[in-house]
Amino acid sequence: MTSRRVFRTLSLLVVFRVWNAVNVTTFFSPDEFWQALEIAYLLVFKYGHMTWEWLPGLQLRGFAHPMYFAAGYSALSYFDVASTPLLIALPKIQQGIVAAFADFFTWRLANVLFGPKIAQWTLFASLLSWFNFFVLPRALSNSMEAAFFAASLYFWHRKPAKYLISIVFMGLTILLRPTSAPIFAMHMAFSPPPRHRAWPFLIQLVLVGVLFLAGSILVDDWGYQTLYTTKHLVAPPSSRYPFVAWNFVKFNVQHGIASYYGEHPWHWYLTNALPTLLGPYLLLVPLVARAWISHPVVGRVTAGTVLMYSFLPHKEFRFLACIFPLLLIAVGMALAVLNTKQLAWPLPHPPAGILVRAAHRRVTRFSTMATLAVTSFALAIYTARVHQRGVIDVMYYLRAQIAAQPDTTSIYFLMPCHSTPLYSYLGRNVRTGWLTCEPPVFMDAAARAEYLDEDRAFYARIEPSLKEWNWRDRWASTALGTSTAAGTAGVPAGAAVADVPASHVVVFNDLYRVHNATGVLAEYGECARFFNSHVHDDARRRGDVVVLCRQ
């Protein structure tokens, strides 16, 4: 494969994924904003909010991911264009480039493992995938993890292997998501380097690992001290030079804090997540199931990862983004089989003859490809452009209101915590508040059983909460950066706030429809409304997004 063709392919992928990223107008996960863009915004512009994971005594997150977006924000600040639409567009462009590299290395990995025919069908599957269109261009660490993971495996398996480059990408992946370390361990066990390169490989692995560990500790220390200085947090000496990966595992796995945000049964990845991620590609699984699962890379690493993650109680779709390139290679294998003109089977372990004959009938091939294309396109457009778009659209409206009245605008989001972006879209240092949802990090088992965060406490008794509403308390709970009920260390100096009502309150229609004349909501009238979703699995988030203005 010529370098010119490789460069041309990469360029086209960048164009496509940047367009894809700019045209994603819906909400998927709070982490794409609150663990990435909001932290980057706070680092650069010296105001904003950080969630409980970043507080002294916890320090569960590293700065490798948000610093990528902080670089873009720094450029906007330097050229004094942070108040323009580039504030929202530039991070999308940056993430579009990351998404393009995920496609690129998935394609290159398929090429070195199975050859150009399966590689081209793998690239086709990656570009057509509804899940990639919906999730890959979002500012999630999982999306960048998928790109680095595919790159590491490509340099490992190419001929000749580039183990040092592979180890570097391995280190970057683990910096982003410490949970990827066992996946790389499985990969090395299933596909070890040759014996004559074992010792040089081990030396490189140790040296790069030590350098990455030292570098990450120094960078994270700088990042945390910058945040604490900006937020006027008094941090204990033990907060210096944090080992973020250990903190992440300790709190989320050992102490089970992640379970506070939901648990799923052990089989959830098999019965729910994988069928959802694959979507219409699930039709192709029988064609290559045996050949795929027996392969040491695309099959066994995927199966081992799903098995490992199944033991963790807290599960999310995006946690499988790391191995999604391997699933797409399996889809590419099936598409290559489906579109082979001869009956020669291009993979080991051919299935029953009936499947071979059926797969090569022209009408079956055309109808299958048409089904894949139409279904994937419909899912991609609906999820990326329609479902949960109101919580994004409302931020553009609020941004315009702030630009018109910057000194009198204050906003309270009376909705489940982190339902919208914040300053990374508003672009102005106005007062904001919301229902907080910090977990009971430092509580014993008895206290945890009784604990309700502000969000859950409000929805447990909506009408009394609206009637007893106190603006001083509501502003204060947000200003502290965490609910004091959660027992989390770190309270900013001068946290006193005034008892001043918000100029705008943002709610979901299902709450407003029932309680619009109750307590504090009776003081407000509707001034804007945005469609959000046709259906929602969270009853608290159903209905349009309604903006209320103080009467």
Image: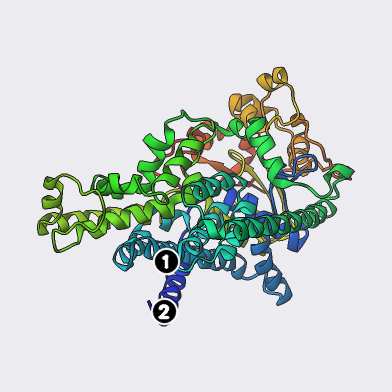
| Farthest residue, direction top | 446
Callout 2 environment at 10 Å: few (<14), some (14 to 19), or many (20+)? few
Would residue 496 be found to the left or right of residue 176 on screen?
right
Would residue 516 be found to the left or right of residue 422 on screen?
left
Residue type of the residue flagged with mark 2: Arg
Relative depth, front residue between 93 and 503: 93
Residue type of the residue flagged with mark 1: Arg
Badge 2 marks a residue whose secondary structure is helix
Residue position marked by numbered label 1 in the rendering: 108
Relative depth, front residue between 548 and 232: 232
Residue 538 image offset from top left, x and y in percent: 48, 35
Q: Residue at x 29, y 56 (%)?
A: 333
First in sequence, mark 1 or 2: give its number. Answer: 2
Q: Residue at x 64, y 63 (%)?
A: 68
Give above or below for 115 relative to 258.
Answer: below
Residue 382 image offset from top left, x and y in percent: 37, 53
* Circle 1 or circle 2, nearest the eye: 1
Relative depth, front residue between 334 and 436: 334
| Farthest residue, direction front | 196
